[in-house]
Amino acid sequence: MSERLKSIYDNIGLPRLIIVGFFLTILAAAAPLGLNVSSLMGDAIRRWAMYGILVLAMVPAVQSGIGLNFGISLGIVAGLLGATLAIELGIANPWLSILFAMLVGLFIGSVFGIGYGMLLNKVKGSEMTVSTYVGFSVIAFMNMIWLSLPYKSGELIWPLGGQGMRTTISLESSFGGVFNNFMAFTIGDPVTGLSIPTGLILFFLLTCFLVGVFMKSKLGMAMSAAGSNPAFTKSSGINVDKMRILGTAVSTALASIGIITYAQSYGFLQLYNAPLMMGFHSVAAVLIGGASINKAKISHVIIGAFLFQGILAVALPVANKVLPEGNLSDVIRIIISNGIILYALSKTKGGSK
Amino acid sequence: METRYLLNMENISKEYFGNRVLKGVNLQVKPGEIHALMGENGAGKSTLMNILFGMPVIHSTGGFEGTVEIDGKPAVIDAPHKAMDFGIGMVHQEFMLIPGFTVTENIKVGREISKPTLLSRFLGRNLETLDMDSMRRDAKKALSDIGLSIEEYVKVAGLPIGYMQFVEIAREIDKTGIKLLVFDEPTAVLTESEAERLLEIMKTIASKGIAIIFITHRLDEVMTVADSLTVLRDGEFVARKDIKDTSVVEIAELMIGRKVEKLVDDQEDTRILSDDDIAMSIEDFHVQMPGEMVKGIDLDIRRGEIFGIGGLAGQGKVGIPNGIMGLYESEGTVRVFGEELDLKKLGNALEHGIANVSEDRRGVGLLLDESIENNIVFTAMQIKEDFIKKVGPMKLFDSKKAKDHALDMIKLLDIRCTGPKQTAGSLSGGNQQKVCLARALTIDPEILIVSEPTRGIDIGAKKLVLEYLVKLNREKGLTIIMVSSELVELRSLCDRIAIVSDGKLAKILKPNDSDAEFGLAMAGSRKESVGNE
């Protein structure tokens, strides 16, 4: 019996136990502090589904052997380009608008991803360092692009001056909330009850399912093999470099879908420096879910995204209640996300790839 | 009068975790003589040298038995610096030189000559300045001692490989009181003219009264320079001979000589092998595999035969399968049943029905974290689109079919495991090898290449694997190419054995050819073996 308990414990791992414990503690503390638990939970669920696809983008990257993709900002800007183009064209139907944004995002993301993958093939062994800087650089580069894109739509550009895009762009007239409101319902009181964004959750789970199917296909399995043992894969007649490019491209393309899903739920597009740290949050989430730099599964994504976003959604109001002064929630978020990345990286065995 | 020996190692035995690698070995070297130490890979040469140098690997595993005497006095060498104090030096096979330093600096590193300065008077020796003039003088002397005319101020980085070796030698010579130098396969990386030069230098050094232990596989070199030799085989002392009393053939026999054990029981043989029915023909084949370079090989392998490729480590035998499979860059022509392989195209050999079991089981042969089932079916799925079900445009993995097949293979090859879902990494070596074999057989090959099929697996599994190979050959008519360092294994299984030496074909032998023939071929005495034909 104790052996079985130990093997269960080994499977879950200490950090995840701590995180789960922490999550349950703050959840338990919420009610006595006079917070509305069901709305907190609703918040956690919404954030879980809206962030989920960005976390999912880690799976093909890790499986194809490039490690944790800190550079999903590349896919994020691809998605933002798609979304802004949809607004610029003024597509009125929200479903058509989001479909257009995603298709453009997918296309640009795949192209970026292929180039990014070729770059990562040149820096084997230090992919994660390079991807971090690619992520940062692309944000800085896009800051210039956002200022100079020749968009004309009043929704996009600063009202004064007539040039350069705003930092936040409302999606009210395009595709804001289109998934969230689809088949949405509320349990209990319409104002304070637990609201469930059915469409958003369905879309997230559908994407997970599709990625899962892809990973079980001939191509997906070749890609995973390339990540776990390049020499073996090569001896089975598979071009490892191509598989790594494929993994990077799929990861980047997923990130572009991810940011559009995120934005429609949030109701705004955030340009400029807003996506700077999103790569880190996704990495932290998938690691909390149980992934390592060599292996990531869909289940890690679903669990990790929920725990990470759940803690942020619940800890923020609780922390503000306990310590009303200061901006503690942000500090907690930084501690958790960077702490878990540090923990996971220290756990990996150097040079094991 | 009894001969005076500079070095006298007597009755040396060494055990690594219950595995005896040296059994009562003697080694005696006279002052100023070149003494060759010979034996196959794994004969115990390196262990003996590690003992001589007091390497930590010896003393951390329980030391050794036997006595070491230097100049007639018992010597205790339990750390490398003590060996240095006794005047024993080593010229390494891999150069231990600092590329950015000059020749002088490399010769003198660690033993710099220094002059006191004002600061050093207060703060110790580390702050003395280097006396470059006397260091240069010493370096020059050492270089001229070995008859090498390079400028002592050039950087090592740009020197040809042969010269780097000479700088190493100069460094050892420069040590004061050096009495014995060990050369560990010094000619392995040199070109022919460089090797000749090195042998000259060795003679020069020996004429100055310094004894040399010369470790090599090359018989011709031994005959040219050595005065005497000691042969080891499987950790046992075989003989000490003076060169003038022996011949190349005798040395070869001493190195190989062992009774041919029967590793495999006889099986009914109804095969008809014909020189007109060629399964694979290799012409002028070159492979750029580091450490196992193949430099132009021609082979014709008949349909239905078990063809062995043998030779010492590093001579290129392992390069052949890796080149055919496209894992390393290769040149030349390989025809499979008359069709030419595209060597540039990865996986082309697989598509032509050639399966390969890699010599590097854990590194190349397996996905250690994946299940046995995935390991077995992976290649077949990727190459032949077996174990795939089509759902619309998607090619999905058919896990049920894969599981059934894996169960069949587990039963067929007797893979000891908890089930097809167990990870390959958690299996024992022998069972891992069976998984590799199962993977190769799953693509239903016409030619099977197995490299080092029994490396690191226990005797029971060894017999089973070898017997299964014979069974496949006899019953299914599978053409098998077996690459192995174990001559016994090759001789008990194969119809013909090609011995590769220095990246080239030394000779094709029959399993019942004499030990001397094998020894000569492996030691690369190509000229003589050609002469015998």
Image (tube, helix red, strand yellow):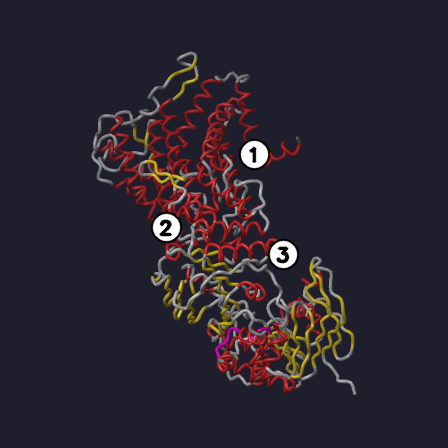
Q: Earlier in the sequence, mark 1 or mark 2?
A: 1
The local crowd at label 2, few if under 14, some if 14 to 19, many if 20 or more residues have their Cα within 10 Å, is some
Given the image, on which type of amino acid does mark 1 rest? Answer: Ile
Determine if the magenta segment contains residue A1.
no
Given the image, on which type of amino acid does mark 2 rest? Answer: Lys
Q: Is residue B452 left or right of residue A269?
A: right
Disc 2 on helix, strand or loop?
helix
Q: Verify CB contact (< 8 Å) between mark 1 and mark 2.
A: no
Frontmost residue, A176 versus A208: A208
Frontmost residue, A22 versus A317: A22
**Pointer 1 residue:** A12
Disc 1 on helix, strand or loop?
helix
Q: Which residues are magenta?
A: B182-192
Please determine if labels 3 and 2 lie on a single subunit. no
Frontmost residue, A339 versus A239: A239
Q: Is residue B348 above or below residue B67?
A: above
x%, y% of residue A4? 63, 32
Q: Verify CB contact (< 8 Å) between mark 3 and mark 1.
A: no
**Pointer 2 residue:** A242
Given the image, on which type of amino acid does mark 3 rest? Answer: Ile
Q: Residue furthest top?
A: A189
x%, y% of residue B134? 60, 81
Frontmost residue, A26 versus B319: B319
Please determine if labels 3 and 1 lie on a single subunit. no
**Pointer 3 residue:** B459
